Image: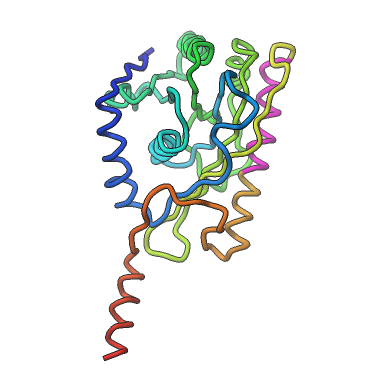
Amino acid sequence: MLEATKHKRFDQLFYHYNALYLIRRHFRFFGSAGQLEPPGYDGKPLLYIMNHSSWWDGLLAYHAARMLTGGDHYFMMEEKQLRKYAFFRKLGAYSIDASRPGEISASMRYSAGLLQAGGRVWIYPEGEIRPLEQRPLMLKSGVGLLLRLCPEAVVVPVTLYHGLFQHSKPEATLLVGKPMHRSWKALHRDDIRDQLQVMLEGQLDAHRGMVQEQGGHVPELFAPLVKSRRSTNEWFDAVLGKRGKL
């Protein structure tokens, strides 16, 4: 497997590039609600689990983690993709190869080591990019193995909901749910997976419902994480509005 090789200077440069260029260029809005650092769990290993429905998931999660939290964050990434984008290792990415059972175990042991050393770990337990509206989420049992290896870990559920709604550019919102801690060691890894699957799917459905209730507009509880830029239709509205006043 490919381990993370964090590089502080590169991380600082990429953080600004990601925020000021990549996200602002491609999204009209990106915001979050909830606490990525849940109170009452100081010193506990934090495992963030998130649905995986787009190529952008890692970059958006990375930005939210860098902006809203302290400490070292690490992100599990498909080995084929990490070999292609090797510079992500400098940001805290490390690999998993789901086609090789031995490599899965190695990645989970590495993840457990990061957690036990005080790092915060992000994983996408679906194991692959799947359509945002596809149900059930179908989590892999590797997340159960990881929690049995690090039973003191607290699971922080994160859902990302995005789409083209009222504007020409997509909008994305990140919702952080209530932390979850169980006697992981006493549970079979499949039982852990099933519990987390129900929790994460329920949160994602509730997240979608928030956006639907607002007719596709971003609900007010989501605070912006980047400065929004006008979408094409907003530029059209501004120009046509000015002409109408002439």
240 and 66: which one is in front? 66
The image quarter in which residue 95 lies:
top left
> Could you say where residue 11 lies in the image, as x and y percent from the top left?
30, 28
> Could you say where residue 6 lies in the image, as x and y percent from the top left?
33, 19
> Could you say where residue 71 lies in the image, as x and y percent from the top left?
45, 24
Residue plotted at (38% across, 49% down): 226
Q: Does the magenta-highlighted stretch encompass residue 202?
A: yes
Q: Is residue 177 above or below residue 236?
A: above
Main secondary-structure element of the magenta-colored stretch: helix
Give the side of residue 74 with respect to residue 144, left or right.
Answer: left
Colour scheme shown: rainbow
Quadrant location of the C terminus?
Answer: bottom left
Residue lying farthest to the bottom in this orientation:
246
Residue plotted at (59% across, 22% down): 42
22 and 45: which one is in front? 45
Quadrant location of the N terminus?
Answer: top left
130 and 30: which one is in front? 30
The image quarter in which residue 234 lies:
bottom left
> Could you say where residue 106 lies in the image, as x and y percent from the top left?
47, 9
Residue plotted at (54% across, 35% down): 36
Q: Does the magenta-highlighted stretch encompass residue 216?
A: no
Q: Magenta span covers which residues?
A: 187-203
Residue plotted at (56% across, 23% down): 46
Count of marks placed on residues: 0
